[in-house]
Image: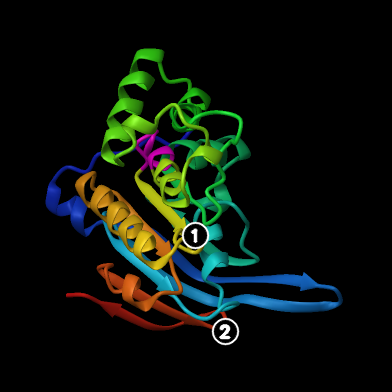
Amino acid sequence: MPPEKKKPRSSKRKKDKIFIKVENVSKSYKMGEVEVKALDEISISIKKGGIVSIVGPSGSGKTTLLNLIGALDYVDKGNIAIDGQKLSTLSEKELSYLRREIIGYVFQNFNLLEEINAEKNIEMPMILAKRPKEERKQKIEELLKAVGLYDRRDHKPDQLSGGEQQRVAIARALANDPELILADELTGNLDSDTGDKIIKLLLELSKKNKKTLIFVTHDNELAILADRQLYMNDGQILKDFSAK
């Protein structure tokens, strides 16, 4: 059976609950005849509702860590658990449920379907989740208004600016009301002013809807907007800063 979303007994418990646990995780990739270690025995715990940024130079392992937490790739060694469930113990059907219902993804390249408009792009995850039509309609309207694109709902991606496309991508990530949002360099293809607005929008929506958010960025000024900042290099977490 697919994993169910569990409601904690109290708001205090919800706030203090460890939602993501990464234990001694390592990951390597083959590049020709050379094996490159992307992650080297990483361990980290993230609480429910936490807002965490990951920074570091190119090739430091940021995206690899995000992909492993998001069940888009598999660990070579160690364990990752989300809400107490080890990803390695889940079937492909359960992992598909996790990716569709529990996790929302925002990518640097937007990954929108070019042939359909903003409204339909946001609706797609809900169709895959077999949400009722009326529920989908209500949620689409709510999300379009939340990201300030209700008047652009009929526009296809090539009729939208980069910032508008990323706002559609954020709305799509929130469509199935996931508990975890993962964002990988979502400002990488945007100018600094637009990127700043996009990050602030994502932070605002995540806090308002009590989501756990992990975002990868190369921009230290954006990273410090998170409650917690992880600095990575050479496949390891070298520094762990908390805003508190």
Which corner quadrant of the image does residue 96 belong to? Answer: top right
Left or right: residue 19 versus residue 12 is right
Q: Is residue 52 above or below residue 87?
A: below
The numbered mark, 2 or 1, whose residue comes first in the sequence reads: 1
- Residue drawn at x 29%, y 71% as measured from the top left: 228
- Residue drawn at x 34%, y 59% as measured from the top left: 199
Left or right: residue 25 versus residue 179 is right
Left or right: residue 193 versus residue 65 is left
- Residue drawn at x 35%, y 55% as measured from the top left: 198
Left or right: residue 207 versus residue 76 is left
Q: Is residue 153 above or below residue 130?
A: below
Q: Amino acid at mark 1?
A: Ile
The mark closer to the camera, 2 or 1, is 2
Q: Callout 1: helix, strand or loop?
A: strand
From the image, tell me which residue sits under label 1: 80
Which corner quadrant of the image does residue 41 belong to? Answer: bottom right
Front residue (pair 49, 215): 215
Residue 234 bears which disc, if any? 2
Q: Which residues are magenta?
A: 171-178
Q: Residue 110, position in %: x, y?
A: 52, 48
Rounded to the nearest angstrom, the CA distance separating label 2 from label 1 is 20 Å
Q: Amino acid at mark 2?
A: Asp
Q: Quadrant of the C terminus?
A: bottom left
Which corner quadrant of the image does residue 134 belong to? Answer: top left
Q: Residue 21, position in %: x, y?
A: 41, 62
Front residue (pair 210, 26): 210
- Residue drawn at x 44%, y 56% as measured from the top left: 183
Residue 144 bears which disc, if any? none
Front residue (pair 193, 183): 193
